[in-house]
Amino acid sequence: MEIRAMPVQLNVSLPTFYPRKIKKEEIHRQVGYLSELAIVSSSPSRPLIASPEKIKYGITEYEGSKRLICVASDQLDLFWISGGNDIMTNYDLDCEPLEVVKTKSGNVPSDIAVTTNGHLVYSDCLDNSINIVKDGKIKVWIKLGEFEPVGLCTSSNGGLLVIMDGWDSQDEHSTVVRFSRSRPVRSTQTIQRDEKGNFLFSSGRARKRINENRNLDICVSGFKAGAVVVVNASGKFRFRYTGNCNFFGPFGPIGITTDSDSRILVADGRNNLIHILDHDGKFLRYIDSCNLLYPFGVCINNDHTLVVSERDTGKLKLIKYCEKKKNLSYESKEEE
């Protein structure tokens, strides 16, 4: 047997990487960057008509002393309403009631919305909860602790956008929070201040409503502030609209909705009219006809008809304000 010498033992020291902190601006200069996503229609597919007209109206159970507050479309030619009690009612286009649901707590819902799956969602600012109705059964979807959910809407990704006040905290200014559609539900975005640190939304218990535009902008109306504030999907401030009332009184925005052309429609309760803006906040026109009396809630149904709830009369009014989308027709010829 041959005896060999042991190989020389080597001590290997692995290299260590020392990262250098690179400023974002340097990366932009050397590599470049992507601009923010913007979805803008070059021309409206449904132009505004010259004279908006009331198609029909219906009188709800809120006629008289009770107040008709909220209206939300489920995109199936049906819509939900709520008012000054604990009842939420589903109506058809003939303003006939189809289904009635009472809040779980017995409180008045502060706002209502309909999910992409057609389920009714409502906020309860007295027990700080957001609830969902499935097959006639109510389930607490989100519990918000010290925060009061003032207004809410569904977002394009199936989640929720909620405008809320924190009355039990040191900070009373309103905050927009995005909630996921996944289980368990969690907050994925919080919007409260602009890039300079200023508050975007007003404080106080005045009405606020929220809606997501087709271009993914988030639109918030504030009655006390007399303004509509719009931020993009990442929460960056875009513009503030404070009315165009040269011949009217102070702007009183309450209900807010958007259409397929990214136009923003705002109910002005102080002046009994609807403001229509483009996606950049440019004033387009009023709807000051149709004998509106304190318009409060607004939504757009599957037929692109504006549905308006009048707070003091208890009426629902369906208004045609834009042209119907034209269907393209094709002609074919047989080969000779």
Image (cartoon, rainbow, N blue to C red):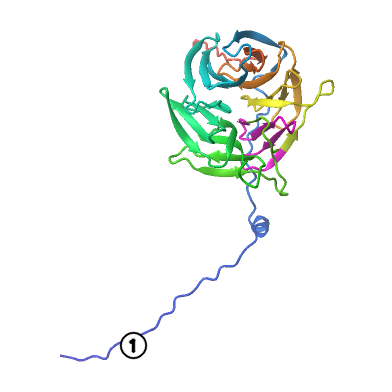
Tell me the residue at 56%/68% (across/down).
19
Q: Considering the image in quadrants, where does the N terminus appear?
A: bottom left
Question: Label 1, on which residue?
Answer: 8
Percent position of residue 120, x then y: 49, 25
Residue 15, relative to residue 239: is it above or below?
Answer: below
| 103 with respect to 23 (left or right) | left
Percent position of residue 21, x then y: 61, 65
Q: Secondary structure at mark 1?
A: loop
Percent position of residue 106, x then y: 50, 25
Q: Residues within 10 Å of mark 1 (few under 14, many from 20)?
A: few
Q: Amino acid at mark 1?
A: Val
In which quadrant of the rendered view does residue 175 lie? top right
Tell me the residue at 59%/14% (across/down).
62
In which quadrant of the rendered view does residue 184 lie? top left
| 68 with respect to 334 (left or right) | right
Q: Is residue 257 visible?
A: yes
Which stretch appears magenta?
Answer: 210-238
Q: Is residue 75 visible?
A: no
Percent position of residue 86, x then y: 53, 22
Tell me the residue at 65%/25% (across/down).
255
| Nearer to us in this view, 225 or 5 | 225
| Nearer to us in this view, 158 or 86 | 86
